[in-house]
Image (cartoon, grey):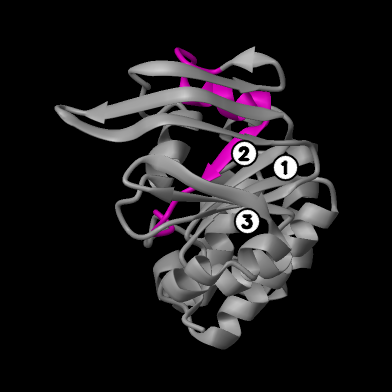
């Protein structure tokens, strides 16, 4: 479904990605593990068209993404939920959510159905739909960010650090919802530092360090890998 082949990405003279090759197949939940600055966000920025690679190929559902505009990529079914939520704090929760459906803006009935699906996943957002997004707790704001991405009707959802800064109980709830989204048929590529929680719901994972993929494997092999446990799990 999504395939990176030898992707390089530069910010000026700094090489953020160095020959990255990875793939996510339909229905999978694939995790990207890595420290801050390892290249996880750069992978997502390249896939979503925000940053153009300096080399290599990125294909989604057989279509080359390099050179496509971000709106075209969203319309093709690849949707990016960014790190840090990036909400409009003075706008209502509902308005923030519906902004995710911009490429589908003519389909009013479809947007209404998508909103109901998001409210089914996050009932608290239905109660707070008229409140300013900035008035919500951190966990509720993350729910809005994920919900907004779902309004884009993703076939593949890129989730960048969804647990960042959240309390452990909220992290557990967020990962349960991510698992439900995946089980409902959406392929998920999840970038996380919270290795244990991420691997617990994953099919496969990649480890990225300094812009290079250094390790890949299925959930169990990485959970039982001593180096991974020492670096990311702490036991």
Q: Is residue 69 above or below residue 138?
A: above
Q: Which numbered disc flags the more N-terminal residue, 1 or 3?
A: 1
Report the residue marked by disc 3: 147
Which residue is depicted at the point 30% across and 52% down? 37
Total labels drawn: 3
Tell me the mark number nearer the camera, choosing from 1 and 3: 3
Which residue is depicted at the point 53% across and 49% down? 215
Which residue is depicted at the point 67% across and 48% down? 188
Q: Which disc is residue 111 wearing?
A: 1
Q: Look at the image and say whether residue 30 sits in the magenta stretch.
A: no
Callout 2–callout 3 Cβ contact below 8 Å? no
- Viewer-nearest residue: 93 or 138: 138
In this image, 221 relative to 49: left or right?
A: right
Tell me the mark number nearer the camera, choosing from 2 and 3: 3
What x and y, as percent, mark residue 103? 60, 28
- Viewer-nearest residue: 47 or 91: 47
Q: Look at the image and say whether residue 81 sits in the magenta stretch.
A: yes
Question: Tag 3's secondary structure?
Answer: helix
For disc 2, the neighbor class at 10 Å (few under 14, some 14 to 19, many from 20) is many
Q: Which disc is residue 101 wearing?
A: 2
What x and y, as percent, mark residue 179? 75, 63
Callout 2–callout 1 Cβ contact below 8 Å? yes
Q: Which range of residues does the magenta coloring cover?
A: 65-87
In this image, 5 relative to 138: left or right?
A: right
């Amino acid at each position: 479904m999504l395939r990176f082949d030898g992707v390089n990405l530069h910010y000026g003279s700094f090489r953020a990605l160095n020959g990255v090759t990875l793939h996510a197949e339909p229905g999978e939940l694939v995790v990207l593990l890595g420290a801050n600055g390892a290249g996880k966000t750069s992978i997502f920025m390249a896939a979503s068209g925000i940053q153009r690679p300096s080399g290599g190929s990125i294909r989604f559902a057989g279509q080359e993404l390099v050179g496509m505009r971000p709106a075209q990529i969203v319309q093709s079914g690849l949707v990016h939920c960014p790190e840090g939520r990036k909400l409009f704090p003075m706008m209502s929760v509902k308005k923030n959510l519906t902004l995710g459906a911009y490429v589908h803006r003519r389909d009013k009935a479809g947007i209404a159905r998508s909103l109901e699906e998001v409210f089914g996943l996050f009932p608290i957002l239905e109660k707070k739909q008229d409140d300013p997004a900035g008035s919500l707790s951190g966990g509720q704001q993350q729910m809005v960010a994920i919900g907004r991405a779902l309004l884009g009707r993703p076939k593949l959802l890129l989730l960048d650090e969804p647990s960042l800064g959240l309390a452990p109980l909220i992290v557990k709830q967020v990962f349960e919802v991510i698992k439900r989204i995946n089980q409902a048929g959406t392929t998920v590529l999840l970038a996380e530092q919270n290795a244990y929680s991420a691997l617990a719901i994953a099919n496969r994972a990649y480890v990225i360090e300094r812009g290079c993929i250094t390790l890949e494997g299925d959930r169990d092999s990485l959970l039982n890998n001593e180096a991974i446990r020492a670096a990311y799990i702490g036991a």
